[in-house]
């Protein structure tokens, strides 16, 4: 079970606040994943480690909340690369790396986590 809590996540990222029971369950699950994925080694302080874990949980939450994370047939989309307002057009980059990767570049939370991971000298497959 996660030692970081929903309250910890919302204190840093209040825009992810929800009262939806299913979303709260997912967030708890994502906090567990972040703690299991991001080890203690390599960080100068436990505060930096916990920030990174919260960023990974927020990243996973954002991906799970995104309508464009996958299509109805399971195809994944990448980052938005172009937009048009008149007649509504959006372009997406192809997702990079294998499906099992965290795709940290696809959300702002993931981008922060990547910076913390690199700063913490974590060069494992998570930084993919």
Image: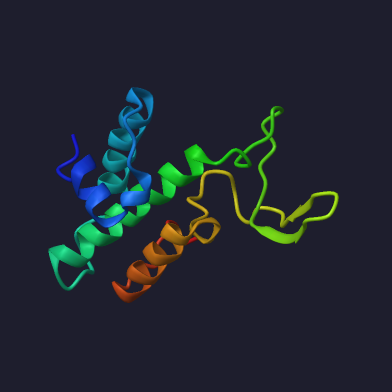
State whether residue 105 is above or below residue 18: below
Q: Residue furthest right?
A: 87
Q: Nearer the viewer, residue 51 or 20?
A: 20
Left or right, 38 with reference to 113: left
On the image, the x and y values in percent for residue 59 come to 42, 51
Q: How many marks?
A: 0
Q: Nearer the viewer, residue 125 or 17?
A: 17
State whether residue 65 is above or below residue 78: above
Query: Residue 67 lies in what quarter of the image?
Result: top right
On the image, the x and y values in percent for residue 127 come to 44, 62
Left or right, 88 with reference to 20: right
| Quarter placement of the N terminus | top left
Query: Residue 13 lies in what quarter of the image?
Result: bottom left
Residue at 31% across, 51% down: 14
Q: Nearer the viewer, residue 124 or 116?
A: 116
Q: Residue furthest top?
A: 21
On the image, the x and y values in percent for residue 19 come to 31, 30
Residue at 37% across, 50% down: 15
Query: Residue 74 lies in what quarter of the image?
Result: top right
State whether residue 31 is above or below residue 49: above
Residue at 32% across, 23% down: 21
Residue at 32% across, 73% down: 121
Left or right, 99 with reference to 84: left
């Amino acid at each position: 079970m996660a030692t970081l809590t929903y309250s910890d996540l919302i204190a840093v990222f209040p825009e992810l606040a929800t009262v939806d029971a299913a979303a709260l369950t997912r967030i708890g699950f994502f906090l567990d994943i972040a703690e299991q994925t991001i080890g203690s080694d390599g960080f100068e302080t436990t505060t930096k480690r916990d920030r990174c874990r919260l960023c990974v949980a927020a990243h996973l939450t954002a991906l799970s909340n995104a309508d464009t994370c996958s299509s109805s047939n399971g195809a994944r989309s990448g980052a938005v690369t172009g937009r048009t307002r008149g007649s509504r057009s959006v372009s997406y980059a192809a997702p990079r790396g294998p499906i099992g990767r965290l795709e940290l570049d696809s959300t702002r939370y993931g981008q922060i986590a990547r910076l913390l991971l690199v700063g913490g000298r974590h060069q494992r497959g998570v930084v993919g």
